[in-house]
Amino acid sequence: MADRRCVFIDFDGTFADQGVAPLEHAEAVARARANGHLILLSTGRPASIVAPEVAALFDGVISSAGGHVRVGDEVLHDERFPAALGRRAAEVLERHDVAFALEAPEALWCSSSASRRIRARMADPAPHAAAGIGNGPRDIVDAVRVPEVLGACSFAKISLWESRVPVEQLAAEIGPEIGALPNSITSEDTSSGELHLLTVDKADGLRRTVEHLGLDLAATVAIGDGLNDLGMLRAAGTGISIAGARDEVRDAALFEVPGPSEHGIVTAFERLGLL
């Protein structure tokens, strides 16, 4: 089809709220795909904390903020921290007594202490108010694994919290290859953040997917709300931001739509003529 679009959608704060996507969003994706459009999830989460029922909604999943790219059943890219850099990152974080998880497509690798802190942090005694797709905090807790040797783990990105020093300082201590961002899942907590390879970006996942599919960048759409979505929004033919996003994100977008509670993906798809 001449007007076929390829849409890349962020998860937390865009497609889902607190790890649960509204049924209206799932239905919109199904309808757009039935109309011949390609719809992919593009998330900072590792694949290990994307619920299978969420991943199944899409034509593919770009996870770890571009570090891992899967289209259909084919993995196009899987980039991890070099072993020596990964060991140094763990050493720096342990020295500062930071709680952290090493994010991999297979699991969230962490120490016994961090495992307990994750479970306490993600405790959700009350059921989520809205019906939807995804399991909220349980998707994170269920992925936690405690390896025999943490420094030997292979991983793509680091999530951290309860840090007494700025995330940017931690990145600088680890090395010039590392970038720092606010945590996309718990952005209200200034002691939380993410450490990533500067060579990895959601925009790279978008470009790799488009090249693999033989599509034109002009036919791409990116929808997101966070700083890790900036590159993706700028690279896409059409960028769409979520209401309440930071100015940099809004400036990179053609227009904005509401958040998940107001079914912004439905609004975006309607404006784009995908439904």
Image (cartoon, helix red, strand yellow):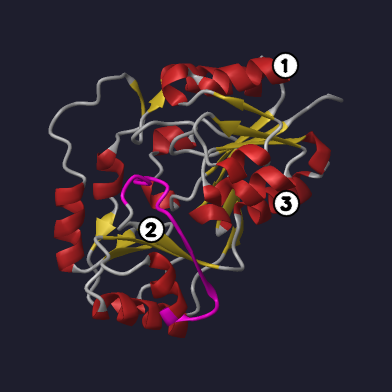
- Whole-number angstrom distance, CA of label 3 to CA of label 1: 23 Å
Residue receiving disc 1: 273
The tag on residue 243 is: none
At label 1, counting other C-alpha atoms closer than 10 Å, the crowd grade (few under 14, some 14-19, many 20 or more) is few
Tell me the element at label 3.
helix
Taking the magenta stretch, the answer to whether it contains residue 185 is: yes
The C terminus, quarter of image: top right
Q: Which residue lies furthest to the front in this view?
A: 247
Q: Where is residue 171 in the image (x, y as percent from the top left)?
A: 44, 73
Front disc: 2 or 3: 2
Q: Position of residue 54 (x, y in %)?
A: 44, 34
Residue receiving disc 2: 193
User: Which of the marked residues, 2 or 3, is nearer the chain's N terminus?
Assistant: 2
* 214 or 203, nearer to the observer: 203
User: Which of the marked residues, 2 or 1, is nearer the chain's N terminus?
Assistant: 2
Tell me the element at label 2.
strand
Q: Give the range drawn in magenta.
A: 173-189
Q: In which quarter of the image is residue 269?
A: top right
Magenta segment, prevailing SS (helix, strand or loop): loop
Tell me the element at label 1.
loop
* 76 or 201, nearer to the observer: 201
The tag on residue 207 is: 3
User: Which of the marked residues, 3 or 1, is nearer the chain's N terminus?
Assistant: 3
Q: Position of residue 235 (x, y in %)?
A: 73, 47
